[in-house]
Image (spheres, grey):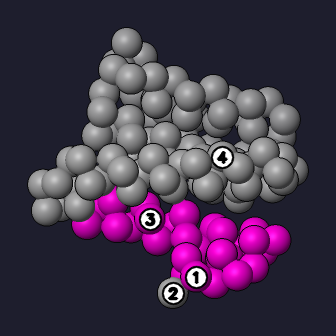
């Protein structure tokens, strides 16, 4: 239903985001079920939407955070592929720009540690 709504209203960032969030949740279910290939497909599809929304709305901290979440999900599932480094770089950029929400400050330390361990 969400995909149909997003397709029917391609200009709605919220409709697109709803699909991205749902894909991440389906990816989580696939991880729990042990279906790594399905999880990756869902996470990659979610990331593509999140990256497009972040690119189209660079001032939106929420859109940037959604990209970080997708990188983290992929990084947790596929270590050594640079996802944590991408997440860390985006968190650092948001921090440097003063756009990282105080409630998300923990992300800098976590992504920095995960990126270092992922090399």
Residue 20: in magenta span: yes
Mark pair 2, 3: CA separation: 12 Å
Q: Which residues are magenta?
A: 2-29
Labelled disc at residue 4: 1
Residue sitting at the far left: 34
**Residue 70 percent location from the top left of the image:** 49, 48
Q: Mark 3 falls on what kind of element?
A: helix
Pointer 4: what residue?
A: 51
Residue 112 visible somewhere in the drawing: no
The residue that appears at 66% across and 75% down in the rendered structure is 7
Residue 33: name its quadrant: bottom left
Decide which of 10, 14 is in the foreground and name it: 10
Q: Which residue is painted at 51% across and 87% down in the image?
A: 1
Mark 3 and 4 residues: CB-CB less than 8 Å, in contact? no
Q: Position of residue 43 (x, y in %)?
A: 42, 51
The first of marks 4 and 1 along the sequence is 1
N-terminal of the pair, mark 3 or mark 4, is 3
Reading the image, the residue beneath label 3 is 23
Q: Position of residue 27 (x, y in %)?
A: 33, 59
- Tell us which disc is closer to us: 2 or 3: 2
Quote the CA–CA distance across marks 1 and 2.
5 Å
Q: Is residue 114 above or below residue 20?
A: above
């Amino acid at each position: 239903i969400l995909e149909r709504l997003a397709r029917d209203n391609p200009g709605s960032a919220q409709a697109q985001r709803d699909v991205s969030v749902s894909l991440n949740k389906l990816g989580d279910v696939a991880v729990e079920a042990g279906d790594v290939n399905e999880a990756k497909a869902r996470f990659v599809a979610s990331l593509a939407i999140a990256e497009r929304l972040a690119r189209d709305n660079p001032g939106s901290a929420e859109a940037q955070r959604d990209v970080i979440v997708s990188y983290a999900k992929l990084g947790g599932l596929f270590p050594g592929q640079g996802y944590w480094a991408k997440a860390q770089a985006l968190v650092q950029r948001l921090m440097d720009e003063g756009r990282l929400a105080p409630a998300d400050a923990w992300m800098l330390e976590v992504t920095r540690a995960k990126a270092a361990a992922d090399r």
